[in-house]
Image (cartoon, grey):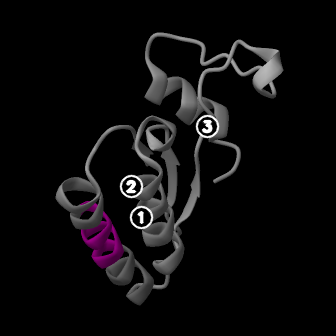
Amino acid sequence: MPVYKEGLAAVIIPTMRSIKAAISTYEMQGGSANIFVNDDGMQLMPPDLARARAEFYDENGIGWVARPKHNLNAEDGDVFIRRGKFKKGIFNDLHASFA
């Protein structure tokens, strides 16, 4: 599931509740499923909000990955270029193999 700047309480938590209910129904029918979040907004928010998202994912058994900030300056660490115009789609394509 791609996430960018959506709010934790307003969007992510209700969405995860809905997904978990659907998974429970699916599991009662013999299936199995996991949730994996491509969170591309963590690097843009204050550290306390990013930490709250990470804790929510961890506490609820939700797998997740977040890209680092766009960084062109090698002196500050590793160079990372956030390519593309449509960040969510590219991030999903990049991490589809994790799921």
- As displayed, is residue 56 above or below residue 91? below
Residue picked out by circle 2: 49
Q: Residues within 10 Å of mark 3 (few under 14, many from 20)?
A: some
Q: Residues within 10 Å of mark 2 (few under 14, many from 20)?
A: some
Query: Can you say which quadrant of the picture contains the C terminus?
Result: bottom right
Mark 1 and mark 2 in contact? Answer it, CB < 8 Å.
yes
The amino acid type, in three-letter code, at marker 2 is Leu
Q: Position of residue 31 (x, y in %)?
A: 50, 78
The percent coordinates of residue 47 (x first, y second) are 47, 51
Cα separation, mark 2 vs mark 3, equals 16 Å
* Residue that badge 3 annotates: 67
CA gap between label 1 and label 2 equals 5 Å
Residue stretch in magenta: 15-22
**42 and 64: which one is in front?**
42
The 10 Å Cα crowd at callout 1, few under 14, some 14 to 19, many 20 or more, is few
The numbered mark at residue 93 is none
Dominant SS type (magenta):
helix
Residue 87 on the magenta segment:
no
